[in-house]
């Protein structure tokens, strides 16, 4: 049997339709991605198309990796010369060869968001723009949206006429572009914009790539934005062998400029387009599929789709409402353990999906305690997140100041004008006198050549000493709050006004909840809640094991990162009004906001193949304050007969109760950063002489006991230390958290 016979009729039709524009518009799990991979195989094997002539574009690196695997499985010879990649990496490859035509050097630098911010600071200084009024992040995000829409600085200026604020932004945009060029640098959006410009201005280069990519395929087309649309349009305009697949019900990136019209208007742009609908879902049982259909049906103005499956009813959908988020996490982790133990599944079969990044914390702690391997996909582990490490470093420094890595991490965070030279001098002094970094800071007057840096270092020490004094009679929660207030940590994030900063604030809120939970637990147990006790508890749950090497792990991720993926068992957690849909979308006047969240819910439900568990909690701590939530409106849209247990739905539909803090944050958009294709940020490893122990040294860990250090790598964010423990074996951990003691 040929591989094409494993496809249904419509799928085959899509595979065999190789020439001319083709749109496959179909619901989740109907085999869209499968059609793409089989189409690639068909083109090569049956149509004799050179693999070299094929371009397949997906959204995330993970999706590209999976498609590559699927293609490699079915295409034999030549698979490696097919371009399977994301929009951004496709553009980087093209620009590295040809950007000199636009006056850049081909070894251009790609600016990450930190670089962009630094550059924007310079621009504002130069133009004497008051960054209290025009915040750097705000300006950057306006520019980014302009670039997504292919609006040049000149066009922006013309459009801005009559609007003072926009004129200012136009001025900044112009200068920002000038500076980028002077630095031979491109920001992330430029990768696409410059490629489009290259194609628009250099007919021969466009022609080369049109000849090269005679067959173009794009997955998840519903989430393309204007510049991506234009890029594809240009590339495909010669041979017009463009096949796009997508599902308007899964469009979830409007907040990043995705334009759902790109898919809905495909037939207008490509008049001779063939449209194929796939109606059979192969992924899920009918209970799961019916639940998904029932939810998405509540959105207005969608293209109606029928989706059916002959996978059988399967298990009913599990639904559980818990008293607290803690109970929720405990149940889910316990449930996974139980099923793995009884042999009915492997860890890999399970995914936990949630709305915001910060929600991973509770699950991670439970997994660490239960010794279950897990992986946060599309993001980093909670305790490895920058803001969490920063704030814990403050607490550690206030606690005892003996952790040099922690002190060095925060000495200039948030920025207080302490340069690397000063820090190195302090470090040198500390090393020569064999004292700790903080101790050296306290003796700053004795450090030679410290010069002007001295007063700033002095005030840092004064700040820490002030926190120390307060710590004596303050709760940890209050202390943390004070640290954030007085250092301006949160403020500096708020000023950024970006989705990324917002995600960081949500993570900090979650840390506050952790502190509050610790203090509550101590009170219940009639034990004193101490700072060192808290840090010790964190150290116990924050270890990162060498999970990367283990191939069987539970997957944790945001709903946004889950797009396109599938798992036998899915837990959709935190289904509460105020969490999902988020408080902001509920209170927004725009019904489209809730519709986008509903699409996200549809994406979540349709990730499940055999088993779906929906959970919510009555009580959840948000930023150390208990919040009482009603179950999500999306839950109520699922017909009762699909649910396993007689779930009791609340009748009254009052809005969820919000803490004063949450209300104060109304001005802040509450969207999770999905961790898609942005480049990995690099964090400088603190200068100095490492974590205080070396390879071969014997060390002690509070949980794992004694062991031998076998490797130390500079992980970018921190040192990663591998220790071969006498008892539990080899573990990999971040030096900052491991608190290893040399013995
Ligand atoms: N004709 C078929 N026979 C058997 N299995 C199929 C068939 N078509 C698709 N599948 C399987 O169904 C599952 C869903 O397919 P696929 O991931 O391609 O769907 P999709 O439409 O891309 O979904 P999404 O919208 O979530 O991206 C996969 O496991 C795939 O292998
Ligand atoms: Mg897909």
Image (tube, grey):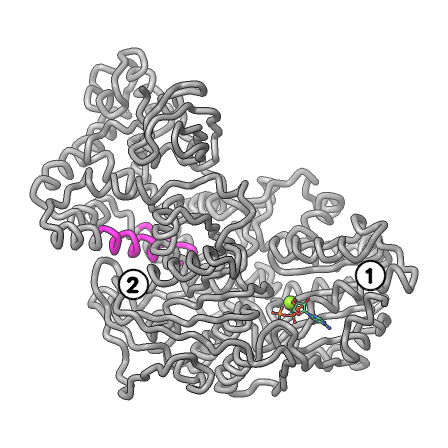
* Residue beneath disc 1: 41
- The residue positioned 48% from the left and 34% from the top of the image is 715
- The residue positioned 48% from the left and 44% from the top of the image is 119
SS for callout 2: helix
Instruction: Spot the residue most to the top.
Output: 432
Ligand 2 location (quadrant): bottom right
* For residue 526, above or below residue 319: above
* Residue beneath disc 2: 327
Q: CA distance from mark 2 to mark 1?
A: 48 Å
Q: Nearer the viewer, residue 453 or 397?
A: 397
Of labels 2 and 1, the one closer to you:
2
Q: Position of residue 743 (x, y in %)?
A: 31, 19
SS for callout 1: helix
**467 relative position to 267: left or right:** left
- The residue positioned 54% from the left and 52% from the top of the image is 678
Q: Counting other residues with Cα less than 10 Å from the Cα at mark 1, is it few (<14), some (14-19), or many (20 or more)?
A: many
Residue 105 lies within the magenta run:
no
Residue 493 lies within the magenta run:
yes
Q: Position of residue 379 (x, y in %)?
A: 47, 52
**447 relative position to 67: left or right:** left
**556 relative position to 313: left or right:** left
* For residue 312, above or below residue 373: below
Whether residue 496 appears in this view of the structure is no
Indicate the quadrant where residue 500 lies.
bottom left
Q: Position of residue 294 (x, y in %)?
A: 50, 85
Span colored in magenta: 492-515
* For residue 473, above or below residue 671: above
* Numbered badge on residue 295: none
Q: Position of residue 442 (x, y in %)?
A: 19, 23
């Amino acid at each position: 049997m040929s591989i094409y016979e494993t496809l249904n009729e419509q799928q085959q039709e899509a595979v065999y339709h190789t020439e001319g524009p083709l749109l496959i518009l179909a619901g989740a799990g109907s085999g869209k991605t499968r059609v793409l991979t089989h189409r690639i195989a068909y083109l090569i094997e049956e149509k004799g198309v050179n693999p070299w002539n094929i371009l397949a574009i997906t959204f995330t690196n993970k999706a590209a990796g999976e498609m590559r695997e699927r293609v490699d499985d079915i295409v034999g010879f030549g698979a490696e010369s097919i371009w399977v990649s994301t929009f951004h990496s496709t553009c980087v490859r093209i620009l590295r060869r040809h950007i000199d035509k636009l006056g850049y050097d081909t070894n251009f630098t790609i600016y990450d968001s930190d670089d962009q911010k630094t550059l924007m600071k310079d621009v504002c200084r130069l133009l004497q723009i008051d960054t209290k009024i025009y915040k750097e992040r705000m300006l950057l995000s306006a520019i980014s949206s302009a670039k997504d829409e292919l609006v040049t600085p000149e066009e922006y200026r013309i459009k801005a006429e009559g609007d003072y604020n926009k004129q200012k932004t136009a001025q900044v945009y112009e200068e920002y572009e000038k500076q980028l060029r002077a630095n031979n640098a491109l920001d992330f959006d430029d990768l696409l914009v410059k490629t489009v410009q290259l194609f628009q201005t250099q007919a021969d280069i466009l022609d080369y790539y049109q000849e090269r990519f005679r067959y173009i395929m794009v997955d998840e087309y519903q989430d393309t934005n204007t510049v991506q649309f234009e890029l594809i349009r240009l590339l495909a305009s010669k041979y017009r062998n463009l096949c796009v697949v997508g599902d308007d019900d899964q469009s979830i990136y409007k907040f990043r400029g995705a334009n759902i019209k790109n898919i809905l208007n495909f037939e207008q742009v490509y008049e001779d387009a063939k449209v194929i609908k796939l109606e059979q879902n192969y992924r899920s049982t009918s209970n799961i599929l019916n639940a998904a259909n029932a939810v998405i049906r509540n959105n207005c103005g969608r293209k109606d789709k029928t989706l059916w499956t002959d996978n059988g009813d399967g298990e009913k959908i599990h639904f559980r409402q818990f008293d607290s988020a803690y109970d929720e996490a405990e149940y889910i982790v316990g449930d996974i353990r139980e099923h793995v133990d009884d042999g009915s599944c492997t860890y890999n079969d399970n995914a936990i999906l949630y709305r915001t990044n910060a929600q991973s914390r509770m699950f991670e702690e439970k997994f660490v305690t239960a010794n279950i391997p897990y992986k946060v996909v599309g993001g980093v582990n909670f305790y490895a997140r920058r803001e969490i490490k920063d704030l814990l470093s403050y607490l550690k420094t206030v606690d005892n100041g003996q952790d040099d890595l922690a002190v060095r991490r925060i000495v200039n965070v948030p920025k207080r004008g302490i340069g690397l030279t000063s820090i190195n001098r302090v470090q040198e002094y500390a090393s020569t006198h064999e004292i700790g970094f903080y101790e050296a800071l306290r003796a700053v007057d004795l450090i030679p050549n410290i010069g002007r840096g001295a007063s700033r270092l002095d005030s840092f020490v004064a700040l820490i000493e002030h926190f120390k004094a307060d710590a004596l009679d303050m709760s940890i929660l209050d202390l943390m709050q004070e640290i954030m207030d007085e250092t301006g940590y949160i403020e500096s994030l708020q000023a950024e006004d970006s989705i990324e900063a917002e995600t960081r604030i949500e993570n900090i809120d979650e840390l506050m909840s952790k502190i509050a939970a610790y203090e509550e637990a101590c009170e219940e147990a009639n034990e004193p809640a101490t700072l060192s006790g808290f840090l010790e508890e964190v150290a116990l749950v924050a270890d990162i094991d060498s999970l990367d090497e283990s191939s069987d792990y539970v997957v944790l991720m945001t709903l946004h990162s889950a797009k396109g993926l599938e798992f036998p068992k899915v837990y959709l957690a935190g289904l509460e009004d105020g969490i999902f849909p988020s408080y902001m979308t509920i209170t927004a006047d725009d019904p489209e906001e809730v519709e986008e969240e509903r699409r996200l819910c549809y994406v979540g439900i349709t990730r499940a193949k055999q088993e779906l568990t929906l959970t919510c909690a009555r009580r959840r701590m948000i930023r150390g304050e208990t919040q009482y939530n009603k179950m999500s409106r999306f839950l109520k849209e699922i017909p009762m007969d699909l649910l396993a247990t007689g779930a009791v739905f609340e009748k009254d539909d009052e809005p969820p109760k919000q803490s004063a803090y949450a209300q104060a944050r109304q001005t802040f958009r509450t969207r999770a950063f999905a961790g898609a294709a942005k480049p990995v940020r690099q964090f400088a490893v603190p200068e100095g002489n490492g974590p205080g122990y070396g390879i071969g040294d014997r060390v002690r860990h509070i949980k794992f006991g004694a062991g031998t250090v076998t490797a130390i790598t500079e992980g970018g964010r921190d040192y990663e230390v591998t220790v071969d423990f006498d008892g539990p074996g080899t573990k990999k951990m971040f030096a900052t958290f491991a608190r290893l003691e040399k013995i």
